[in-house]
Structure formats: structure tokens, C-alpha cells
Image (cartoon, rainbow, N blue to C red):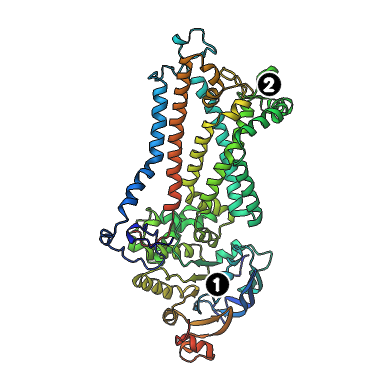
């Protein structure tokens, strides 16, 4: 920065480690103005993402031609190629169920694994090993989802069909959703593989956010725990997780936003079957993967296209909601939870 | 490590440091330091920034090894028992030799749970926890000040109160030695005075070892003072003697403010 920052522009420093001095009066900043032209240009820029988002929502809403939830939630049967598209109703429930199962279970698995990785990185692993593991998980994030999909379809699906699923059925067959007749196991694509792939795809994001949340726990607090005779694990459990809990929840929310939006990879491994899946081995659809796979036939059926646009709108709104939740939680990591800042009566 | 029961105060030091050296990968932080600390006394460690004061106290309850890549040589005996013996559990050492840090760091828990933290780790029964929490807060002068309102968050206290909460938390574990690493460095003068009064009281029951860069503070509260310079122990003697009649030229220049 080659120009002086006017005091009015400087963000309030978080805390002064020294004697808690009285905050400088707010008034002096008034006469010091940043160049007004720059400010004038800056504000629409700052709003740009919001405007863009609004436009996307608006365009989607218009494209659906006001057929808001002309798709009834419980349209129990989706006529795959409707004979009379104009008169059909389209139900979202089936796809919402597929989304909830894949994203929900994948998120639970990914969160657990990410938490374990993040704890290992911040507490147990020597720095060098930690850096390698960090690089590896971050690399996973860079793999295009179509690559995950083709790998799942070509490599994993046969293995799932021949080994993983039969074994799982034998071991957990008593559990609802894990049993069923032998014929329940098909070619390997289906919910189980979809969940597996989606878990892999979500892990980099949740791990990164959880890792940074745990890392942001001040060293002093951790050492204070150790100095009271806590073992490293007790410090993790009673101090680190507690101090970082907002960021950890943020990771879960952001991960969910990521998971429900995934379409390409899931379209390739989920078995694409319009059905209420009889078991974890059965084929399914998610809202996003359905949009992706149906786009070509939608050209011929304007009603279908509108319904798909509404599907997209649903996904978009849910994603926005979870990302907002996640970002709110994560932003708290930096500003809040700094215990011992002193003088905060 | 189950040390012997507290016996009469004798000439036997409670902590005895011999040839302690601490090395980081590219430099020596502490170089062959030997000294004894007595029970029921306040010992101050002074010296310019970076002289190894903090490392010395952190080495007395095995907190130095928390940082990776640090090598520790020499011996530290607590009541005759080697704390660096590989069979000794550092967790138990830290229960006997408590520590309070420079910055007040309450956990994001209630005041009560902050003090109970170490006790819960040891699985102590509820009634005993209750008594100990109260006694520790009384010792730290917080019980009366808070009027017994101990359910609110420890983070709502003022800086000075937070630091006394941290002292109460350390006392609750019933240590014999209390290490204080510049406990008043981030506090205003009034809060500092309260801490100093508290330390003065604590020496009736504990061995207190305090790191400070404030020489007046050392002179006010310490029975003995050690002067460290560039990782070496230059002089360790009775506080009055060290400040008024130092044996070493280097100590004299430091306490008269010629460098620092």
C-alpha cells in the first residue's frame, strides 16, 4: 500500500493486548473522508454479488412462468415422459427424498471424518505430516466432479456390486434399508455409491473449515488447559471443540450447501431411477441430478422445463440459506471466541 | 507421581534446577541454568526480553515441550523427584506445579466451571468440587467481589478479574508450586496491585515463582530474585541484595536501568 490510510478507514483493531485503554472518541473520523468518487464506485461493486444473485432468482422465477409449485410436492408418480405434459403435475418429493438421503448421510460421514482429520492435524500430528495431509485434502477439492463421477461409474460401481454391497447386506441386513432380497443389489450404482462419492466430494470443504476453526483457538487457551493437568485429548474435548463450535457448525452448513447442489457426479453414480428407493442399494435421483439428466427431453416439453427451473430455484434457495448460515457461523470464528481479550465487562 | 506428604518447611528446596538447557533448532534459549526454589516464598525471575525467563518457568512444569522441536537437557527435581524422568506423566507434574499465563485466558464457560475445570478432569465428587471452587474463588478475592454470582460466563469479567479467575482455577487443583508468567502484563495499575496483594498472600501456602519485566514489581513482592541474561543465570539472591548490592556488574547495569 503506497498511500496513507486515513484513520477513518481503518477497521477497529480487535483488541489491544496492553492496558485496556479507553476507545478513542469516534468523532475525529468525521472530517476525514475517503475520496468520494472511490466510495461511490465501491458501493455498487460491493452490492454486485447481491444484485447478481437477485437476477438469478428473478430469471429462474420468470422462466418458470409463474407455475410456482404447479409441481405439487407430493406428485407421487413422475410421468417420465408425460403423454400430456400440459396436464401433468410434477412432484418434487421423490427427488427431495433422494437429495435428503444422499446429502444428509454424506454430510454426517464427511463431518465425522473431517472432524477427526482436523483434530489430528491441530493436536496430534507433527507439522510436516500435517502439511502433507492438508495438501492432500485440499487437492481432493480440485478434482472436477465429472472425474469423480466417471471413476465411480467405471471403477467403483463393479466393485460395489461384487464385494461391498453383498458384504454390507450380510453384515447389516437386519438394519432397515440395508437388507432386502439378493436382487436388491444391482450394478453397483445407487444410493450407497452416490453417498460414498458425495462424501469424498464434501470432505475437502468441511475439513478445511473445521481445521481453520480449530486452529483459530488461541494457543494460550489450549496451554491453559494443559497447564491444569488436562491430557491433549481432554483439551480437545473440553476446550478446543467448545471454543471452535461455531466454526464447526459453519463447516457442516457449508458442506450441506455443497452437497445438495452436486449434480454431475451423482447423475453418473446414483442409478437414476424414479422410485422411492427400496434400500440403500437402490437407484435414486436428487433434485440437482434430475435437472441435469432431464434437460434434453425438457426441450420438447415446456411444462417439464418450467418444472425443472422451479427445481433449480428450490435448490438455489436452500443453498443460499445454508451458505448464509455457514458463513455467519464461520465469520464468528474470527471476531468472537477470543476469550481473555480483557476488559470486556 | 505421588510425592511425599507435605512435611515441615526445611532447607530442602521444593524445586531444584540443575544444568537446565533448552535448545530450539537454531539457538540456545536457556544455557546451563541451576537454581533452587524454596517453599512458601516468592521468587522473581527478571531480565530483558528474550532472555529465557518464560522458557525457564515453562520448563518447571514441562510446558516447554508442548512446542515442537525444542530440546531440553538437565534436571528439574520437585521435592527430590525428577520431573523429566521418562516414567513421569507430565499431566501429574502440571497438577502439582500450576501455571498462570501472561494473558488472562478463561475458558468460554461459567466462572464456576472455569474453576472446576481441573477438578472435573480428576473426577472429584460434586460436593468436594463445590467446596474447592468456593475456597479458590475466596483465595483469589473474587467470591466476595462477585457476590457469589458464579454462573455467568468467565468472559464477562474485567481483565483483572479474569486473571484472578485464572489464578483461582490454578489454585483449585491444589498445586504446591504456582508459576506466574508476567501475570500482570496486560492489566492496568489497579488490577496489577490486586494481583500483587494476592501473590503476597499466596506465599503463606505456596511456592510462587513469578516472571516479570517490571523490576519494581519484583522488588515489592519477591523474597528472592533471579536475573537472567541471554539464556544464562547471572545472579540469584535475596531480592534486597540483588537490587541494592548486586554481585555482578551485569546485574547492576540492568537493575539501574542502563539497559533492558
Inspect this view and state whether residue B202 appears.
yes
Question: Label 1, on which residue?
Answer: B57
Question: Label 2, on which residue?
Answer: A185
Residue B77, percent across and down?
62, 73
What secondary structure is marked by label 1? helix
Q: Do labels 2 and 1 share a chain?
A: no
The answer to whether marks 2 and 1 mark residues whose Cβ atoms lie closer than 8 Å is: no
Image: A200 above or below B89: above
Relative placement, left or right, of B25 versus A257 is right
Q: Give the quarter of the image for residue A72.
A: top left
Q: Which residue is drawn at 48% across and 73% down?
A: B205
Q: Mark 1 lies on which chain?
A: B
Relative placement, left or right, of B87 versus B160 is right
Q: Mark 2 lies on which chain?
A: A
Residue A11, percent across and down?
37, 57
Image: A334 above or below B196: above
Considering the image in quadrants, where does the N terminus of chain A appear?
bottom left
**Nearer to us in this view, B65 or B94:** B65
Residue A218, percent across and down?
49, 58
Q: Distance between the residues labelled 2 and 1?
A: 64 Å
Amino acid at each position: 500500500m503506497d498511500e496513507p490510510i486515513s484513520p477513518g478507514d481503518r477497521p477497529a483493531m480487535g483488541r489491544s493486548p496492553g492496558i485496556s485503554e479507553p476507545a478513542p472518541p469516534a468523532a475525529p473520523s468525521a472530517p476525514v473522508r475517503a475520496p468520494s468518487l472511490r466510495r461511490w464506485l465501491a458501493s455498487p461493486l460491493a452490492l454486485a454479488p447481491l444484485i447478481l444473485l437477485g437476477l438469478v432468482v428473478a430469471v429462474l422465477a420468470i422462466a418458470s412462468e409463474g407455475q410456482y409449485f404447479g409441481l405439487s410436492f407430493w406428485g407421487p408418480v413422475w410421468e417420465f415422459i408425460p403423454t400430456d405434459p400440459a396436464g401433468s403435475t410434477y412432484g418434487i418429493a421423490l427427488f427431495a427424498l433422494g437429495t435428503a438421503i444422499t446429502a444428509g448421510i454424506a454430510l454426517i460421514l464427511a463431518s465425522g471424518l473431517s472432524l477427526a482429520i482436523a483434530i489430528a492435524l491441530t493436536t496430534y500430528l507433527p507439522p510436516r505430516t500435517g502439511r502433507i495431509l492438508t495438501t492432500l485434502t485440499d487437492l481432493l477439492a480440485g478434482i472436477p466432479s465429472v472425474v469423480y463421477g466417471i471413476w465411480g461409474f467405471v471403477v467403483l460401481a463393479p466393485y460395489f456390486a461384487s464385494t461391498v454391497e453383498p458384504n454390507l447386506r450380510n453384515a447389516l441386513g437386519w438394519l432397515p434399508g440395508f437388507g432386502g432380497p439378493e436382487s436388491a443389489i444391482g450394478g453397483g450404482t445407487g444410493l450407497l455409491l452416490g453417498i460414498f462419492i458425495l462424501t469424498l466430494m464434501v470432505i475437502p470443504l468441511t475439513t478445511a473449515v473445521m481445521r481453520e476453526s480449530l486452529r483459530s483457538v488461541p494457543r494460550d487457551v489450549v496451554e491453559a488447559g494443559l497447564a491444569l493437568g488436562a491430557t491433549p485429548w481432554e483439551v480437545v474435548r473440553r476446550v478446543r471443540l467448545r471454543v471452535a463450535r461455531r466454526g464447526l457448525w459453519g463447516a457442516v452448513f457449508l458442506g450441506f450447501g455443497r452437497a445438495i447442489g452436486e449434480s454431475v457426479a451423482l447423475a453418473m453414480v446414483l442409478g437414476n431411477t424414479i422410485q422411492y428407493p427400496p434400500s440403500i442399494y437402490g437407484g435414486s435421483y436428487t433434485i440437482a441430478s434430475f435437472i441435469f439428466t432431464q434437460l434434453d427431453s425438457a426441450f420438447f416439453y415446456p411444462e417439464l422445463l418450467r418444472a425443472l427451473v422451479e427445481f433449480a430455484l428450490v435448490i438455489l434457495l436452500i443453498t443460499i440459506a445454508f451458505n448464509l448460515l455457514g458463513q455467519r457461523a464461520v465469520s464468528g470464528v474470527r471476531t468472537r471466541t477470543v476469550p481473555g481479550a480483557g476488559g470486556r465487562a | 507421581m505421588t510425592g511425599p506428604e507435605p512435611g515441615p518447611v526445611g532447607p530442602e528446596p521444593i524445586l531444584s534446577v540443575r544444568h537446565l538447557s533448552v535448545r530450539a533448532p537454531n539457538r540456545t534459549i536457556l544455557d546451563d541454568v541451576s537454581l533452587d526454589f524454596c517453599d512458601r516464598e516468592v521468587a522473581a525471575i527478571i531480565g530483558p526480553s528474550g532472555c529465557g525467563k518464560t522458557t525457564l518457568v515453562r520448563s518447571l512444569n514441562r510446558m516447554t515441550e508442548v512446542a515442537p522441536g525444542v530440546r531440553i537437557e538437565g534436571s528439574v527435581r520437585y521435592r527430590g523427584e525428577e520431573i523429566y524422568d521418562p516414567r513421569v506423566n507430565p499431566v501429574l507434574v502440571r497438577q502439582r506445579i500450576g501455571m498462570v499465563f501472561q494473558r488472562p485466558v478463561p475458558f468460554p464457560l461459567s466462572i464456576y466451571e472455569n474453576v472446576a475445570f481441573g477438578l472435573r478432569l480428576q473426577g472429584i465428587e460434586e460436593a468436594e468440587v463445590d467446596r474447592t471452587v468456593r475456597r479458590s474463588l475466596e483465595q483469589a478475592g473474587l467470591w466476595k467481589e462477585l457476590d457469589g454470582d458464579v454462573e455467568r460466563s468467565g468472559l464477562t469479567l474485567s481483565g483483572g478479574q479474569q486473571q484472578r479467575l485464572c489464578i483461582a482455577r490454578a489454585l483449585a487443583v491444589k498445586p504446591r508450586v504456582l508459576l506466574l508468567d508476567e501475570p500482570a502484563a496486560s492489566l492496568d495499575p489497579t488490577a496489577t496491585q490486586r494481583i500483587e496483594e494476592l501473590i503476597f498472600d499466596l506465599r503463606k501456602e505456596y511456592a510462587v515463582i513469578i516472571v516479570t519485566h517490571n523490576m519494581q514489581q519484583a522488588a515489592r513482592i519477591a523474597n528472592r530474585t533471579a536475573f537472567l541474561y541471554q539464556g544464562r543465570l547471572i545472579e540469584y539472591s535475596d531480592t534486597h541484595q540483588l537490587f541494592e548490592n548486586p554481585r555482578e556488574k551485569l546485574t547492576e547495569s540492568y537493575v539501574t536501568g542502563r539497559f533492558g
